Amino acid sequence: MATFRKRGPYQWEARIRKRGYPTTCKTFESKADAEAWAKEVESDMYKNLFVPSKEAEQYTLGECLDRYVAECVPNLKHPKREADRARFLKRYPITHRIMATIRSKDIAEFRRQREEEGRSGNTIRLDFALISKLFNYARSEWGMESLQNPVQIASKPKPGKGRDRRLEDGEEEKLLDAANEIFRPIILFALETAMRRVEIASLLWKHVNLRGRYVLLPETKNDGPRTVPLSTTALDILRGLPHPEGQDAGQERVFGLTAEQITDSMGTVCRKAGLENLRFHDLRHEATSRFFEHTDLDLMEIKAITGHKTLQMLIRYTHLRTARLADRLAGAKRGNNLTLYPEQVDNSGPALSV
């Protein structure tokens, strides 16, 4: 049964007590609003549809982000990345709002703020993904069943244009000349295998099989293991590295740099070599494109090597030189330039995404 009491000159509190349900109350600016709310809640209780909203009306988005970081993030594959994003989001006014009051229009306003800051569509989509996961987690784990996920109906920013940066003529040589003896093998290995930065950084000697000509990646971005075959050049790179000895030699990392150190080294080398807009991940694009240009591997074979989850993702990483395509049209086989008129061959042309 609902009771109503006046709280100050402008507020009315509705309080509902019903057997089998927790005492539920809410404050309104008018008695009519309080009575309408009580009638709706009592109807839901009678139909066994009522879900308590006390938890959702008690905590802010920022407080829930802190709890999410403490409880859920440590179990993720890359906890630091998610924790840093959650802490960064706390700079925005939306995180001061009570969870139950956040609507899709608030998410849209947050998106506009991020767009005005010049953030890419992909970055904003990652912010949305985190907030959406938080709402779903709060509903399933924290007793906030009454919550609606506002991200699900908010307009998402368009995905940004994928990068198509490839190494131009002479840039590989400049990159290698500027790299030290520790980082140079990493660059070459990335170009030969198309492995991701984290995969290279976490590669252990116990997962290297020189006799079988492959390396095993027990854990990858797509949550499954992957075996990467090694070319003759990749084998030579591994054979040229110092091999650890002793009982725990297999636990040693092959290249000795963390993922963050690889990123820092790439930035230093690019500045030293005078190369602009080049990232370490672009080497994966370059290697994938070279598989199509320099080998006769088919689409599924290349997908197995690179570890792309779908063919669509593989295509996004493939940027073929227009000159190479012109050679193919003129009858050249994959992996070979047209040799009939070599003066017409120009491999410095733009990369064409396919």
Image: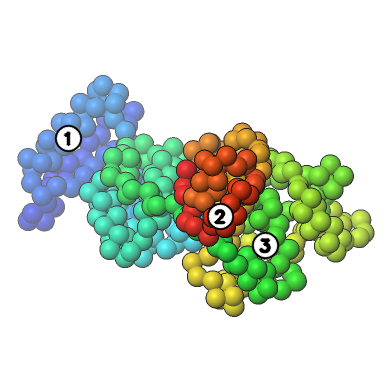
Q: Residue at x 28, y 40 (%)?
A: 153
Q: Which residue is drawn at 45% across and 59% down?
A: 85
Q: Distance between the residues labelled 3 and 2?
A: 27 Å
Amino acid bearing label 3: Ile
Amino acid bearing label 2: Val
Most extreme residue toward the bottom, as rendered?
A: 272
Instruction: Tell me the quarter of the image containing the N terminus.
Output: top left
**Seen in the image, is 51 located left or right of residue 334?**
left
Q: Mark 2 points at which residue?
A: 345
Answer few, some or many: residues within 10 Å of disc 2's Cα (few below 14, many 20 plus, some between 14 and 19): some
Along the line of sight, the residue nearer the viewer: 126 or 97: 126
Along the line of sight, the residue nearer the viewer: 159 or 44: 159
Q: Earlier in the sequence, mark 2 or mark 1?
A: 1
Q: Position of residue 62 (x, y in %)?
A: 38, 58
Along the line of sight, the residue nearer the viewer: 291 or 157: 291
Q: Select label 3 or label 2 by which is in front.
A: 2
Q: Residue at x 38, y 52 (%)?
A: 160
Q: Where is residue 353 in the image (x, y as percent from the top left)?
A: 46, 47
Image vertical order of residue 110 relative to residue 262, above or below:
above
Q: Mark 1 points at which residue?
A: 38
**Seen in the image, is 29 located left or right of residue 310?**
left
Let me know if residue 193 appears in the view.
Answer: yes
Answer few, some or many: residues within 10 Å of disc 3's Cα (few below 14, many 20 plus, some between 14 and 19): some
> Circle 1 sits in a helix, a strand or a loop, which is it?
helix
Badge number at residue 234: none
Q: Mark 3 points at which residue?
A: 187
> Circle 2 sits in a helix, a strand or a loop, which is it?
loop
Answer few, some or many: residues within 10 Å of disc 1's Cα (few below 14, many 20 plus, some between 14 and 19): many
Question: Circles 1 and 3: CB distance less than 8 Å?
Answer: no
